[in-house]
Image (cartoon, helix red, strand yellow):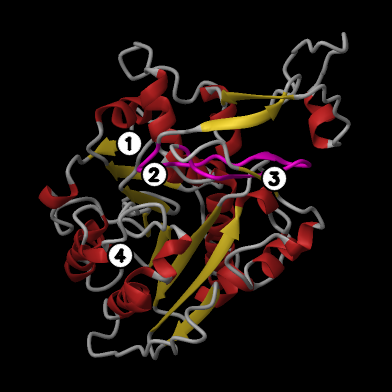
Amino acid sequence: MRNGLTLGSLFDGIGGFPLAAVREGILPVWASEIAAAPVSITKRHFPDMRHLGDITKINGADIEPVDIITFGSPCQDLSISGRRKGLKGERSGLFAQALRVIKEMRNATNGTCPARIVWENVPGAFSANKGKDFQTVIQEIARIAEPEISIPRPSKKSGWLAAGAVLGDCFSLAWRCLDAQYWGLPQRRRRIFLVADFGTQCAGEILFKREGETGNIEKGENEGDRITGNAESGVKPYVVDIGSSTDRIQMNAQLSVTLKAKGGGNTGLYCLPFIYNAFGDYEQGNTGKTILSRDDITTGDLIVSGYSVRRLTPLECERLQGFPDGWTEYGYDGKRISDTQRYMALGNSVAVPCVQFILLKIKNRLIFQSGGNLITNKDL
């Protein structure tokens, strides 16, 4: 029997959820992923975490029970930049496999594990299949606790709001669209985060209550009221369209460019200031002046002598997502991971500080419920 809170990560990628868990004193016990490079990267950083492989071959009753299960299920069929096949698409359809594993574990533990789950996906899930797919998502998650529950779909005119909640007799779930720029990362990256609590009506408190624990909660609350736009920052996005073969890119001059995952992770080209390096490493421009430190970037004190088009480096992508420098550089065997694989893995990963915010709120809520007697892994 383990002490403290434990976590299992489905569709794990490069360990974004386990990394956020460790930072908040939660122990990652196992993960499921099939892509070789991400598995190798994650094994390097979490050698004691069990790797379960293909989710379709996992029986939730046979693996170690955990308090929290996270799953950023594949989103390519839900993304507005994809083919929009929705949950019926081959990859996004794996959402059903995650629910199966969760149900099997709960049946095997008399409904005690997992007590909470966290789902992450693209905002395109709100509109996929005319809103029916998101209805399916929240309804099927709710049915883990109340099998007969039926959740209505909003009118076509209003659509799904970027934040909301469902309360049942023995469960609660809430969702909120978080933008990474309000959690300390220099990119605009909006993702839906859904928390389900099987046993209490605290899911809304976890996502919406302002406790000032991490990030800019005031900003995040306001931004969550809409799916698009950046009205709260006071900065008009700069739109660059550099050809029909690339994605359109929105740049916020005070924050940096957006890390995009096109078709599942290929990071495209970006229009950057000539002497501008996204995180202030030494770089000489034709003005003869040099950007010396990261502080120059965060304060907006930049010297721009023109623009050039180039790719972000893998290191910049790691920092844009909140990973430590070099997180994806080497695999478990010590061999270097190719830049192509690093771009793919990072584009498909999560913004780590956003996950930390949620996991910390879950942990703090459980500490409150236990009267301060909950022992977390950070305390051991």
Horizontal arrangement in the rendering, residue 148 relative to residue 250 (left or right): left
Report, in whole angstroms, how far the alpha carbon at label 2 lies from the one at label 4: 14 Å
Helix, strand or loop at disc 4? loop
Q: Secondary structure at mark 3?
A: loop
Q: Position of residue 193 (x, y in %)?
A: 48, 62
Main secondary structure type of the part rendered in magenta: loop
Callout 4 crowding tier (Cα within 10 Å): few <14, some 14–19, many ≥20: many
Could you say whether the residue bearing mark 1 is in a helix, strand or loop? loop
What residue is disc 2 on?
28
In the image, residue 308 lies at what x, y percent? 66, 23
Asked if labels 4 and 2 touch by Cβ distance under 8 angstroms, the answer is no
Mark toward the viewer: 2 or 3 = 3
- Disc 3 target residue: 184
Marking on residue 113: 4
Please, is residue 197 above or below residue 91 in the view? below
Q: Badge 2: few (under 14), some or many (20 or more) residues near its Cα, within 10 Å?
A: many
| Sequence-wise first label, 3 or 1 | 1
Whether 247 is among the magenta residues is yes
State which region is magenta: 246-265
Residue found 36% across the figure and 31% down from its top: 42
C-alpha gap between disc 4 and disc 3: 32 Å
> Cβ–Cβ below 8 Å for labels 4 and 1?
no
Q: Mark 1 highlights which residue?
A: 49
Q: Check if mark 2's residue and mark 1's residue have beta carbons within 8 Å.
A: yes
Q: Is residue 55 left or right of residue 265?
A: left
Gap between marks 4 and 1, in whole Å?
A: 18 Å
Amino acid at the residue labelled 1 = Met
What whole-number distance in Å separates the C-alpha atoms at marks 2 and 1?
6 Å
Give the alpha-carbon distance from disc 2 to disc 3, as whole Å: 24 Å
The disc, 2 or 4, on the residue closer to the chain's N-terminal end is 2
Picture layout, residue 173 above or below residue 314: below
Mark 4 against mark 3, which lies toward the viewer? 3
